[in-house]
Amino acid sequence: MLKAREAVRALPAYHPPLGGREGLRLDFNENTVGCSPCVLERLRRLDLEALARYPEREPLEATVAGFLGVKPTELLLTNGVDEAIHLLCETYLEPGDEALIVAPTFSMYPIYAAATGALVVSIPAGENFRFPTQEVLRRISPRTHLIAIANPNNPTGAVTAREDLLAIADAAPNAALLVDEAYFEFCGQTLVTAWRQLPNVFVARTFSKAYGLAGLRIGVLLGAADQLHDVRLVSSPYNVNAVALACLPDALADEDYVRQYVSEVCDGRTHLEGFYASAGIPYWPSQANFVLARIASREFVPEMRRHGILVRDRSSDYGCEGCVRITLGPHEHTERLLAALQETIGKLGLAQGASRQ
């Protein structure tokens, strides 16, 4: 009888709650208003021939490389950051290898790593989700071949210091260090070009968040040219679809649109954190497009849904019992969110007085 590999059969299933998402969607860290109008105009101009041809990735890789200030050989376009993670696991992990993952974080890191037959070493974050640099350094061994770190982290929004990331890469020269910068635009800290001194460093970016292209599934993996040569051997030559490739240059060109959106998100983040502080609701200062708070009420998420606002319960993540993550958007969305929060917090009796994690 045909059976999947044992490593695959042992994987936990990931079922994001995508169904029934009517209302203001502040639950998946998506851009809450969508892509630049320039992208929509490009979509309208696509012709039948463009869709009939196999997509050609390399010319756009040169465009994106120029935009990011790297060489085309230091860049691989991917089907979202998810594929970038998958490709690194397939390239560098063998059964019996170790992948170091700090919890809580993006759930696909351990899933893709475990699927190769590697052992996932889960390292708990420190107090208040502080990044456990010394513990990560202590757990590096000759079997360590992948270390995945979201920076800023999801779901906490916390940033790991650049010097700590470089210290980890230096201490694990035989391991691929993936620094997932999916929320870079809301933070500004990056390890781009660090691979020129430490060739085991990889950086992933996405155009799903600030650029509003989550539905097109396009991201980018950056690293040393010789390492990316090997990663390309695992990648499909047609991994990014023609529609995404056609639209990305227009998204990159409309810098004002992205800049304005990011500015309003960061303003909203400040206002949401201020609301939590004044209400005495514990929260964690964020450098991403969301804020995590501990709201110990099972009625909170359904009550917010009754207001037409979707938020994400993160209680199943390590250390996040009772926590809710809320995505920020433009000013009008933040105003609507804060009004609903004010009413919901009052109705459920959750306000306690000034507090902060």
Image (tube, rainbow, N blue to C red):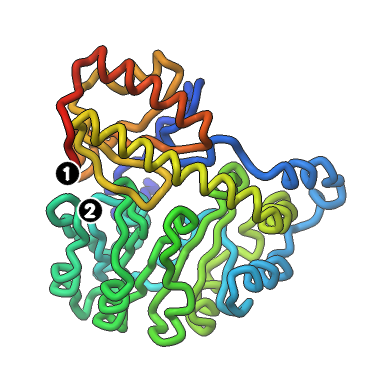
Q: Position of residue 313 (x, y in %)?
A: 30, 31
Query: Which residue corresponds to the image point at 73% horizontal and 54% vertical from the top-left?
Result: 250
Residue highlighted by disc 2 = 103
Q: Front-most of 96 and 137?
A: 137
Q: Residues within 10 Å of mark 2 (few under 14, many from 20)?
A: many
Query: Which residue corresponds to the image point at 36% horizontal and 20% vertical from the top-left?
Result: 304
Residue highlighted by disc 1 = 319
Q: Position of residue 132 (x, y in %)?
A: 17, 63
Q: In the image, is residue 106 above or below residue 292?
A: below
Amino acid under disc 1? Gly
In the visual, does 282 lie left or right of 56? left
Residues at badges 2 and 1 in contact (C-beta under 8 Å)? Answer: yes
Instruction: Give the alpha-carbon distance from disc 2 to disc 1, as whole Å.
Output: 8 Å
Q: In the image, is residue 256 above or below residue 90?
A: above
In the visual, does 110 lie left or right of 35? left
* Quadrant of the snapshot with the C terminus: top left
First reached walking from the N terminus: tag 2 or tag 1: 2
